[in-house]
Structures are given as structure tokens and as C-alpha cells.
């Protein structure tokens, strides 16, 4: 350890190295060698690498497919409730499934909108109209407000099959409500520099709805 300290103490600082590298005494080219510029141009592909937008394409397709699956979950819940064949507990659970799915859809929308821009808010149409980022954010804030209010903490999932359908929170309505409130605040904060009045109002409404998700108990 003592030897290491001596070496580090005697080593030139970053500033000294830069000063030496930029001094006039340093030759711009090696003897009988190419200039620095030519060397960089020769090896530019090795240093930088080719451009590849495959990651963006994967995110686009993944988000689109996940939104489609979430829309299907909402439709299944609507059809089950509309059938009139469910008891009180099952109806409450399916209502929570729908609300949780709407919250999750908002999360997926934020990933898409913040990465690519425009998105649709018409999930029933086969030829949906794409909305501006501003319109999407207004939709998402309203969707979170309605979904958080729709969750009934008195109807948690009680069977293993119901819990297995939700890898995140096992259909625990209290956790989904807190996650929705946190998403609500998160989106409102993103508006703080462009629409501060709207951001303030939405944060106050979200705060009044509950505590939100905390690190100690939240998965996301």
C-alpha cells in the first residue's frame, strides 16, 4: 500500500498531461509516419463503429405489442363484467384488473411518446389517428386520475390463478393504486417547465389520492 501511494503521488496530474500533450514541443506526426488527422480518418470506423438503430426498432415493436396485449386485457375485463355472470368479489377483481391495465398502458405510452413522439389514444380503431405529445400527456394524466379512483382496495386477488396473472403485484390493488399515483406525479413533473400551472395542479391531485410507491415496497 505504501508503494502504491508513492507512485500515485508522483504521477502527473490530468492537467499536466493535457498541457504536455498540447505543448508545441510535441510533434504533430510520428517520424516518417502519417499525420494525426490521417490516422484518425483511417481508423474512424474502428474507433466509432457503424450506426445502428436496431435498439430503437426493438423498443418500438416491443411497446406496440405490449400495448396491444394490455388493450386485450381491458377488453377481457369489460366483457366479463358485462356478462352479468360474476359475483360481487369477481366483479371487484375484474374492475381492478381493468384499472391496473389502464395504468400499465399509460406507462407503456410514456415509453413510446418520450422516445418517438406522437401516439394514438384511440385503442378501438384499426386505423387510429395519432395525437401530438401534448395531447397524449393530457390523455395519460386523465387516464391515471380515473384509473386510480377506480381501484377498490377491498377486492384483492385471492386465488393463486388470479395472482399468477400479474407478475408485478399479484393483483394487489393497493400496490397498483400507489404505482398509478407515482406515475401521475412523474408525468406532472415532466410538465413543470412547459406548463407549471398544470404540473402543480396535477401533483396536488395525485398527492391527495394517496402516498404513491416507495422504494422500500415498490417494484418499479
Image (spheres, helix red, strand yellow):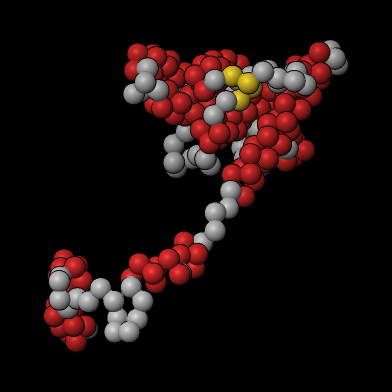
Residue 141 falls left or right of residue 154: left
| 25 over 148 or under it: above or below | below
Q: Is residue 87 visible?
A: no
Residue at x-position 54% and y-position 20%: 132
Q: Residue furthest front?
A: 32
Q: Is residue 18 visible?
A: yes
User: Residue 166 at what x, y percent from top left?
Assistant: 68, 37
At horizontal 58% and vertical 48% (from top left) the residue drawn is 53
67 left or right, relative to 115: right
In the rendered image, residue 59, in percent from the top left (x then y), is placed at 61, 42
Residue 158: image quadrant is top right
Q: Using the rendered view, name the quadrant where residue 37 is placed.
A: bottom left
Of residue 129 and residue 95, the one placed in the foreground of this image is 129
- Quarter of the image that includes the N terminus: bottom left
139 on left or right of 210: right
Which percent across, then down, holds residue 94?
Answer: 73, 23
In this image, 144 relative to 74: left or right? left
Marker count (numbered): 0
The one of 172 and 189 positioned closer to us in this rendering: 189
Q: Residue at x 70, y 19 (%)?
A: 128
Residue ID at (37%, 21%): 194
Residue 20 picture location, percent across and down: 16, 72
Amino acid at each position: 500500500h505504501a508503494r502504491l501511494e508513492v507512485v500515485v503521488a508522483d504521477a502527473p496530474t490530468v492537467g499536466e498531461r493535457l498541457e504536455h500533450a498540447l505543448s508545441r514541443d510535441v510533434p504533430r506526426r510520428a517520424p516518417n509516419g502519417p499525420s494525426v488527422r490521417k490516422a484518425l480518418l483511417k481508423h474512424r470506423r474502428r474507433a466509432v463503429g457503424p450506426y445502428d438503430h436496431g435498439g430503437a426498432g426493438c423498443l418500438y415493436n416491443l411497446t406496440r405489442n405490449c400495448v396491444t396485449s394490455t388493450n386485450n386485457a381491458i377488453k377481457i375485463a369489460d366483457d366479463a363484467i358485462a356478462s352479468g355472470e360474476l359475483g360481487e368479489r369477481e366483479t371487484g377483481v375484474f374492475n381492478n384488473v381493468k384499472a391496473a391495465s389502464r395504468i400499465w398502458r399509460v406507462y407503456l405510452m410514456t415509453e413510446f411518446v418520450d422516445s418517438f413522439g406522437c401516439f394514438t389514444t384511440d385503442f378501438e380503431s384499426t386505423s387510429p389517428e395519432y395525437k401530438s405529445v401534448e395531447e397524449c400527456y393530457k390523455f395519460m394524466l386523465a387516464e391515471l386520475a380515473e384509473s386510480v379512483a377506480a381501484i377498490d382496495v377491498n377486492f384483492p386477488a385471492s386465488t393463486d390463478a388470479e395472482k399468477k396473472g400479474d407478475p408485478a403485484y399479484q393483483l394487489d390493488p393497493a400496490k397498483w393504486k400507489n404505482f398509478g399515483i407515482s406515475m401521475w406525479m412523474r408525468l406532472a413533473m415532466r410538465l413543470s417547465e412547459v406548463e407549471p400551472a398544470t404540473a402543480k395542479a396535477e401533483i396536488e391531485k395525485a398527492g391527495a389520492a394517496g402516498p404513491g410507491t416507495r422504494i422500500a415496497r415498490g417494484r418499479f
